[in-house]
Image (cartoon, grey):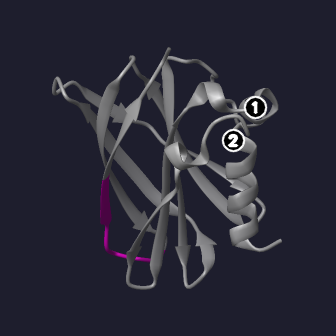
Amino acid sequence: MTLSRRIARFLSLALLLSIPLSSFAENVTKFGDYVIHHTALPTDILLPEVARAYKIKRSKNRGMINIVVQHKGKGIGADVNGTGTNLNAQLKHLEFKEIKDGDVTYYISSFRVTNKETINFKVNVQPAGSGKTHTIKFKKEFYTR
């Protein structure tokens, strides 16, 4: 199974069909030969079996980030760390756990959210074998009702 198919499989398992996919669109950031896929979503939309398999707590008050790193089309490991800051300047330290699924490695972090909370994420990614750290920034508004 190709890397793109594995990423698609995970994302399709993670999203319920009743939720508009456009509101959880995957983002891609490129740095030369490196491609970093990053997605933020509420954990309550995960299917129960997916949440159990990856040990993610499903809750309307929890969000998660999923990071996948590719180099020349192949999934690679990375050192991933980051923070999230809401509009009240409250800092959320993101602790990423590594999940390997065949030839794809996911970096997942979950965190508490409140209704209509917008979080500005700053995630640092140092791909394995690279001496350079790449920073991605994005924001996501979460709804808990």
Specify whether residue 56 is in view.
no
Contact between labelled residues 2 and 1, with CB atoms less than 8 Å apart: yes
Circle 2: residue type: Ala
The correct choice, above or below, for 72 with respect to 88 in the image is: below
Q: Residues within 10 Å of mark 1 (few under 14, many from 20)?
A: some
The correct choice, above or below, for 135 with respect to 130 in the image is: above
Residue position for label 2: 14
The image shows residue 89 at horizontal and vertical percentages of 16, 27
Which one is in front, 56 or 19?
19
Residue position for label 1: 47
What is the magenta range?
129-137
Marks 1 and 2, how far apart in space? 6 Å
Q: Residue lying farthest top? A: 145
Q: Is residue 31 left or right of residue 10?
A: left
The image shows residue 102 at horizontal and vertical percentages of 78, 62
Q: Earlier in the sequence, mark 1 or mark 2?
A: 2
